[in-house]
Amino acid sequence: MHDLAKAARAAHRSESLARTIITACGIGVSLVPILIGLFLLWKGSATFLIFGHSLPGFLLSGQWAPNDGAESGGQVGAAMFVTGSLVTCLLGLLLSLPFSLTTAICMTEMVTPRIRRFLQPAVELFTGIPSVVYGWIGLTVLIPFLRKFLPMPYGFSVLAASCVLAVMIYPTITTMAADAIAAVPRAWRDASFGLGATRWETITRVVLPAARSGIYSGIILGLARALGEALAVAMVIGQMKVFPVSLLKPATTLTTIIAADMGGAMDGGEYNAALWTMALLLFLISFIFIFLIHRLGTLQKGGAV
């Protein structure tokens, strides 16, 4: 009995220790995004609190000439970078979405399980390709191709960056859309067939509407992925600090300007503070996207109930 009680106490101590470690790790990891957000808020707010710029001027002005020093007086309008990011990401989404949805429908509704076991790893393989590889292929293959067939002198353009982003977000949207479609109960399909609907009518009028929340989540997650990409976009967009007036001309984005200029900006200067403010803006946009994903997930669960 004494040995059994001793073993029980040892097991209880081990369980308590494991529970404490797991809880501490979970709480610690959960605090990391909050700490990152507070750090970005501290660094990014210097543009407004120290150098005296206004939020409307930062978001709506296209004048970008900050002082690379501790003195204020420069211009920190980031509208051209925000516009470049939105245009590039939205165009990439429009290019990727048809291929992503058709692939997801093919994997879940059209092909046999044997072919599906081949297609799914092939799609997921895109995720493991490094960003620099996408950028290098875009630089050496896509840009010469566009320059040959379109009236663009250099090839570096918003269109080239959008094409690269379309390929990069393709596996994200495809995987989430396929999971959402596969989660639709089989009985719904059988009921549709029993009422005389064809396979295509069942897909378009039953399956896709039932899976729309999951598909929307995949789209938002893909858009967030595109918005945060820097290296591949920087290699093909041209890095010109101008408004994206044409898809066939160079421009720049929030991520590319941060990646290109942060290392050379003086720490504590107006230029450095403006770049940190753009990083804060990216963080807030990503937070909004994540909130939308969770909201759509809640709506999907409510609809399933």
Image: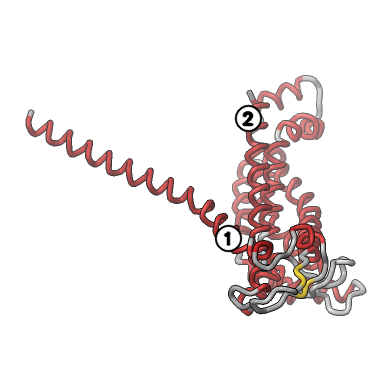
Q: From this view, report whether residue 100 is shown above or below residue 45.
A: above
At x 70%, y 58%, the residue is: 227
Circle 2 sits in a helix, a strand or a loop, which is it? helix
Check disc 2 and give the amino acid type: Lys
Q: Is residue 134 above or below residue 219?
A: below
The percent position of residue 108, horizontal first and vertical second, equals 67, 40
Residue nearer the viewer, 101 or 47: 47
Residue 259 in sight in this render:
yes
Question: Badge 1, how many Cα within 10 Å: few under 14, some, many 20+?
Answer: some
Instruction: Say which quadrant the N terminus sits in.
Output: top left
Which residue is tagged 1? 42
Within 10 Å of the Cα at label 2, are there few (<14), some (14-19), or many (20+) other Cα atoms?
few
Residue 173 spot, x, y in % from top left: 69, 49
Q: Looking at numbered disc 1 in the image, what kind of residue is underneath it?
A: Trp
Residue that mark 2 sits on: 301
Q: Mark 1 and 2 residues: CB-CB less than 8 Å, in contact?
A: no
Judge depth for marks 1 and 2 and give the one in front: 1
